[in-house]
Image: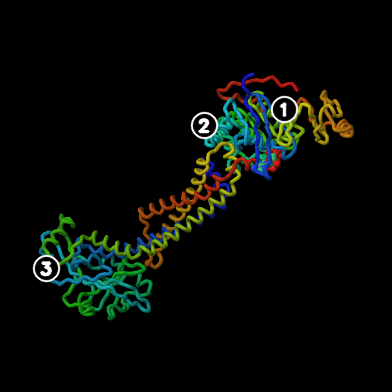
């Protein structure tokens, strides 16, 4: 395999000093390949957002190194960071953070213009991207006229417009209902697959874990491989797989913290998980090929 | 980024309207005052500009009409008349006094020239006659109108009563106007005998005023000789010098008000949009670009305000002559450009505080908000 899109080496982030010191992220190391979707889960306050901000060059680690496409981001001067964020990193935020004064098309084309594209080119590119995300009929709309799911897709288009190497999403489904949350996740997986992006998603939403190639568990600032962990789809508790109460449904295996949870699940499974495979999204065509860039296709990482 | 700036500005129309109105009123204050001043100063030199003399001869050292007294022996007239290139030389007697029309009093510059003089007499007679008999006077129609006086009414000036026989137009301002009486009335009232104030000189066709003034200087001693434009310029300078302080105060007040309004608006608008600016920073927009957006907003607000102020001032300038005619607004291009440039500088200054605010916005904490 070629060089990973993202390499994180022994990254630690401390806030404050002395008695009030908080170690928000503790010696985290992580490689994310092109085309791979990594989901980082964990309880509130475990350091997920802090880690994501460091990956996005918005926050400097106290120690450790981060490489994006082989470039050591942590070694760059402050002056060079905006450009790095603009061209190599795509951000998707929990509350969308669209610009309220301009329409959907401008929301997506402005970052492209910032990156040096001429206005007309930027708009063409943004329109194509929005079209591909099923928003072709919303180009002239103001963000406030959109539904939550549509806003999130605009935010995704904005994150992709400069063809970043890595896409970072912090709780992208927190403000969405189950259906839109799932749609968003499938979209992110498609982006990773079709365009060879490294996608890192931070969430504590149990419903989306089956979309990731890899699920990591963060607790107390440190990452643990979640392969051995299972999340109880009923109560959301995280349990070690060996100790879990197991049930199979729809050809898939689920782990529960107790028999009570398992029985509840088996009574009405669809209340807790979505059927798999998810049907293709209506209205959204294939993503347009990224301009002048090789698509790195990745085999699905076995779970 | 111009588009984003405009969009940011127009999203809240009420605020934009209030801010441009505020800036507009403040700048209108500056423009109107400037126009009042220019208008008044044009009227102060009305006699010099309109009387038809190419060259003014005055007592040595005297360069203006106002705030000075020029006394010349009447023999100077003959001396000037004999200078080559002179078509005519007319002695003019002049005094500043107040004219009482009914209950009202107005400052007026009283002139007296010999009958049928080729220059120096009344012009733009809008009612009655300019050919005066003893005991008669010509005054400006604006002061007559203001005081409700008509042809045939009596007014008091130079300690005597005169009958109004003619009205002239375009000489009155809030501070002065022009009146004409006969020479013998003037001499009797003032006891000035043979002494005259100035000699008004008309050049022969083909003789430039400048050359004529030079010739008179050579031939006649003990006098100051100026062309009409030199004389008018001295006059305007005198008025400007006298009013510099008040103009400075008015301008400063207007500009500061405008600055405060624009600054406050841009600041509030920036605070309200702080989060979006933080998001733009997180996406990779540099501070410099963000400053541009803010400066553009300030410039547009100020520009719209200035346009409104110009419209207001011009409408006033058109409307006022229909009123009493004492207040004249005259907006010259130089003053307008100066106000526009100052306003632009103020817009940039108004952007400084918001720019500082933007510089301090930490994109990480902006995008972290709401996440858990
Ligand atoms: N700027 C900061 N200053 C001090 N402490 C912070 C700051 N940012 C985050 N923290 C702390 O770091 C820990 C991790 O926070 P965060 O990364 O937001 O967790 P998560 O996203 O997993 O909920 C929390 O204890 C939080 O209070
Ligand atoms: Mg978080």
Q: Earlier in the sequence, mark 1 or mark 2?
A: 2
In-image side of B60 versus A209 (left or right): left
Chain letter for the residue marked with disc 1 in the picture: A
The front one of B198 and B81 is: B198
In the displayed structure, would residue B94 be above or below residue A150? below
Percent position (x, y) of residue A183?
71, 31
> Secondary structure under badge 3?
helix
Identify residue for label 2: A117
> Secondary structure under badge 2?
loop
Q: Residue at coordinates 27% horizontally, 75% vertically from top-left?
A: B137
In-image side of A275 versus B311 (left or right): right
Q: Nearer the viewer, mark 3 or mark 2?
A: 2
Distance in Å between CA atoms under marks 1 and 2: 33 Å
Tell me, yes or no, if residue B49 can be seen here. no
Identify residue for label 3: B78
Distance in Å between CA atoms under marks 1 and 3: 111 Å
Percent position (x, y) of residue A301?
71, 21
Chain letter for the residue marked with disc 2 in the picture: A
> Secondary structure under badge 1?
loop
Chain letter for the residue marked with disc 3 in the picture: B
Q: Residue at coordinates 13% horizontally, 65% vertically from top-left?
A: B221
Counting other residues with Cα less than 10 Å from the Cα at mark 3, is it few (<14), some (14-19), or many (20 or more)?
A: few
């Amino acid at each position: 395999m070629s060089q990973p899109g993202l390499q994180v080496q022994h990254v630690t982030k401390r806030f404050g000093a002395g008695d009030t010191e908080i170690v928000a992220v503790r010696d985290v190391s992580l490689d994310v390949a092109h085309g791979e979707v990594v989901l980082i889960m964990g309880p509130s306050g475990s350091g997920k957002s802090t880690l994501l901000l460091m990956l996005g060059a918005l926050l400097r680690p106290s120690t450790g190194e981060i490489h994006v496409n082989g470039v050591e981001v942590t070694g760059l001067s402050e002056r060079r960071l905006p450009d790095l964020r603009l061209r190599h990193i795509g951000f998707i935020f929990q509350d969308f953070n669209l610009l309220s004064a301009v329409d959907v098309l401008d929301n997506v084309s402005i970052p492209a213009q910032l990156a040096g594209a001429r206005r007309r080119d930027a708009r063409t590119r943004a329109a194509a991207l929005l079209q591909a995300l099923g928003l072709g009929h919303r180009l002239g709309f103001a963000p406030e006229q959109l539904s939550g799911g549509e806003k999130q897709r605009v935010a995704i288009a904005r994150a992709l417009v400069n063809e970043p190497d890595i896409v970072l999403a912090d709780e992208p489904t927190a403000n969405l209902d189950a259906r839109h949350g799932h749609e968003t996740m499938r979209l992110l997986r498609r982006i990773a697959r079709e365009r060879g992006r490294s996608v890192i998603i931070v969430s504590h939403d149990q419903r989306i874990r089956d979309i990731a190639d890899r699920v990591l568990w963060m607790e107390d600032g440190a990452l643990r491989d979640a392969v051995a962990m299972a999340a109880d789809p009923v109560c959301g508790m995280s349990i070690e797989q060996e100790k879990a109460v197991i049930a199979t449904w729809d050809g898939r295996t689920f782990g529960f913290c107790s028999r009570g949870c398992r029985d509840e699940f088996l009574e009405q499974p669809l209340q807790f998980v979505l059927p798999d495979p998810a049907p293709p999204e209506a209205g959204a065509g294939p993503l347009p090929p990224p301009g002048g860039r090789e698509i790195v296709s990745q085999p699905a990482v076995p779970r | 980024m111009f588009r984003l700036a405009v969009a940011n500005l127009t999203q809240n129309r009420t605020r934009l309207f209030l801010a441009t109105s505020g800036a507009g009123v403040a700048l209108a204050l500056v423009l109107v005052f400037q126009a009042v001043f220019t208008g008044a100063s044009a009227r102060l030199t009305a006699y010099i500009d309109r009387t038809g003399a190419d060259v003014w001869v005055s007592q040595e050292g005297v360069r203006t009409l106002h705030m000075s007294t020029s006394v010349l022996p009447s023999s100077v007239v003959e001396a000037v008349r004999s200078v080559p290139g002179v078509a005519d030389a007319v002695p003019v007697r002049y005094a500043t006094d107040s004219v009482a029309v009914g209950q009202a009093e107005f400052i007026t510059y009283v002139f007296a020239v010999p009958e049928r003089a080729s220059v120096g007499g009344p012009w733009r007679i809008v009612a009655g006659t300019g050919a005066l008999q003893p005991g008669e006077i010509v005054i400006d129609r604006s002061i007559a109108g203001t005081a409700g006086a008509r042809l045939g009414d009596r007014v008091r000036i130079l300690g005597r009563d005169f009958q109004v026989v003619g009205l002239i137009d375009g000489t009155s301002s809030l501070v002065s106007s022009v009146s004409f009486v006969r020479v013998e009335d003037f001499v009797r009232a003032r006891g000035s005998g043979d002494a005259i104030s100035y000699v008004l000189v008309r050049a022969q066709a083909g003789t430039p005023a400048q050359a004529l003034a030079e010739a008179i200087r050579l031939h006649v001693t003990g006098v100051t000789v100026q062309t009409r434009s030199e004389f008018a310029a001295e006059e305007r300078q005198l008025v400007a010098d006298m009013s510099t302080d008040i103009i400075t105060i008015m301008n400063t007040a207007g500009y500061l008000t405008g600055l405060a309004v624009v600054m406050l608006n841009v600041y509030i608008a920036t605070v309200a949009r702080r989060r979006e600016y933080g998001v733009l920073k997180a996406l990779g927009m540099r501070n410099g670009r963000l400053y541009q957006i803010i400066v553009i907003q300030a410039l547009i607000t100020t520009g719209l305000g200035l346009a409104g102020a110009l419209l207001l001032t011009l409408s006033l300038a058109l409307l006022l002559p229909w009123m009493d005619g004492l207040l004249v607004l005259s907006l010259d291009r130089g003053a307008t450009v100066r106000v526009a440039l100052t306003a632009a500088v103020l817009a940039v200054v108004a952007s400084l505080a918001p720019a500082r605010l933007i510089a301090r916005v930490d994109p990480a904490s902006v995008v972290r908000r709401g996440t858990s």
